[in-house]
Amino acid sequence: MSESFYERAGGQKTFNDLVSHFYALVAVNPILRPMYPDNDLHGAGRRLQMFLEQYWGGPTTYSDERGHPRLRMRHSSFHISRKEHDAWLICMKDAVNGLEIADDLKSELWQYLEAAAAGMINAAD
Ligand code: HEM
């Protein structure tokens, strides 16, 4: 069997680096910070990390703990217009760029995140 993206990209360390960097930016972002739980940014980070690890062929802890991802449904209680979408992607772009992985892996990851973020928009501006 060929190696998963998860393995090729460096496994858990890479996803931990990505999500830690992302949430450090969310914590000080005036558009995003109010959307996340007041005292559980760490929990939010853990959920995103588990999801991304599973999506890319790593451990399936996300579904073991949370069930089917149904991400669009799970985001329906948040107002996500172009503005929140752009803020999320700006933080994520910085986090992806900061990873110490090959450029082709970065661009594969980035293309997915960009497409997934577009699918999460649920409100007009
Ligand atoms: C487009 C902009 C987005 C915004 C503003 C946004 C915002 C949020 C917020 C406020 C939460 C709740 C935090 C928590 O878990 O307590 C959340 C959860 C989550 N988001 Fe996003 N999100 C966006 C895009 C995405 C994308 C593109 C993905 C996946 C590639 C994603 C994956 C997740 C996951 C896995 C959770 C936890 C779901 C759960 O198990 O409850 N989000 N998001």
Image (cartoon, grey):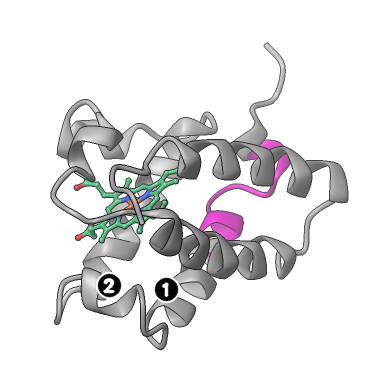
Which stretch did the figure color magenta?
Answer: 7-16
Residue at image location 48% in from the left, 80% down from the top = 25
Residue 71 within the magenta-colored segment of the rendering: no
Q: Mark 2 belongs to which amino acid?
A: His
Residue 85: x, y in percent? 45, 56
Q: Tell me if residue 42 comes above or below residue 6 in the rendering.
A: below
State the residue position of label 1.
23
Judging depth in this view, the residue of 30 and 58 nearest the camera is 30
Q: Who is closer to the viewer here, 75 or 125?
A: 125
Query: Secondary structure of the magenta portion, mostly?
Result: helix
For label 2, being within 8 Å of ligand 1 is answered no
Type of amino acid under label 1: Tyr
What element does badge 1 sit on? helix
- Circle number at residue 104: none
Q: Return the residue found at the far bottom.
A: 28
- Asked where in the image residue 23 lies, by quadrant, the reply is bottom left
In the picture, measured across the screen, residue 10 lies left or right of residue 18, that is right
**Residue 42 — which label?**
2
User: Badges 1 and 2: C-beta atoms under 8 Å apart?
Assistant: yes
